[in-house]
Image (cartoon, rainbow, N blue to C red):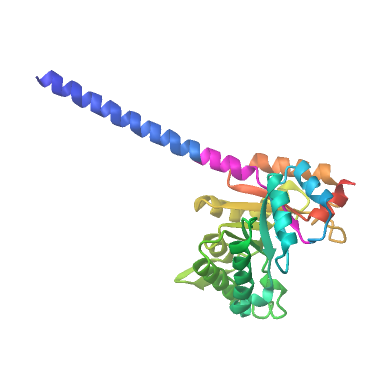
Amino acid sequence: MKKLVINKNKRLIVYIVLIFLCVSFAVGLGLFINNSKSKNILGVWWWNNKLDASYLDFAESNNVTEIYYYSSSFTEKTSEFIKNANNKGMKVFWLTGDCKWINNFSLLEEKVNNFIEYQNVSQYKFDGIHFDIEPHQLSNFETDKINLLTKFVELVYQVKNKYSNIYIEYDIPVWLHDKISFNNQTKPVYEFIIDYSNKITLMSYRDSFQEIYNSIIDELNYAISVNKVINFAVETQDNLEDDITFVEEGEEFMFEQIKQLKNIIPQNYGVAIHHIVSWVDLKK
């Protein structure tokens, strides 16, 4: 009888261990798949909504997965663009932003309410909102920096609480390391923005993989610690400082730098290119 009880206990322990190992494997596989997907993100800003269909074909042929599409209003043309992009396997996020919103939340609310109305009636919907709200564009930023950065964080917090059912992401510069106090916490601005958003895109505009890596490492490590995905972004526009844009080096060199960067970044990231028109010009 004692041997039978012992054998039953042993079998029970074996079953528990097997279940634990299966669950651990499933969780690990899920994290691996999630991180693999995040590494496949290739986004592009789309500031001009009057471009012809060749630009969308270009995006598809270059494996773009998501578009940040600017529009000041929502029309049938908006719906048609989303339909065509979706049919090519690309997500579309509404691109909008104004630094004035930092001092006037009601202006943002008005815009987002228009977005919600469009989403409610349109068959072809945005996948979320991609905010480009840059506090450093305010005229008094240098003289009132900490106050304005705190207001920016407060705005992001308000957006999260009021529009929790909308997927929302933000463009931010790589230098938001000033510490502020908000919501009973004191820490760098970028940590608050990562906490209160679904995703951020770092405007890491440099023309070498090492410089990009150096500029994003703090944000990347924090994003990994809170299981968030971030994009790092590259610039292709002309008439900028040489070390900011890839316009002098060309597209092939740019993607070689991106490849090298991917080799040293562990997880939780995507890539974004600014912007579709200058990227097409870069390829010519």
- Residue that protrudes farthest toward the left in the picture: 1
Residue 241 seen in the figure = yes
Q: Which residues are magenta?
A: 31-47
Asked if residue 41 lies in the magenta stretch, the reply is yes
**Front position in the image: 169 or 134:** 169
Query: Is residue 174 at all visible to an observer of this figure?
Result: no
**Residue 150 versus residue 243: which sits nearer the camera?**
150
Is residue 230 on the magenta stretch? no
Task: Decide if residue 44 is on the left or right side of residue 148.
Answer: right
Residue at figure coordinates x 34%, y 32% from the top left:
19
Give the tally of numbered discs: 0
Give the side of residue 239 with respect to residue 177, left or right.
right
Q: Quadrant of residue 205?
A: bottom right
Q: Quadrant of residue 277?
A: bottom right
Q: Residue at x 75, y 60 (%)?
A: 77
271 is higher (above) or lower (below) than 131: above
Asked if 28 appears above or below 3 in the picture, the reply is below
> Where's the N terminus, which quadrant?
top left
Q: Where residue 126 sits: x, y (%)?
A: 64, 57
In this rendering, the answer to whether 227 lies above or below 167 is above
Q: How far from the left and from the top, in percent, is residue 272?
A: 71, 52
Task: Report the residue at 23% width, 24% height from top.
Answer: 10
Residue 129: percent from left, percent from top: 63, 61
x, y percent for residue 209:
73, 47
- Determine whether, in the image, residue 157 is placed left or right of residue 9: right
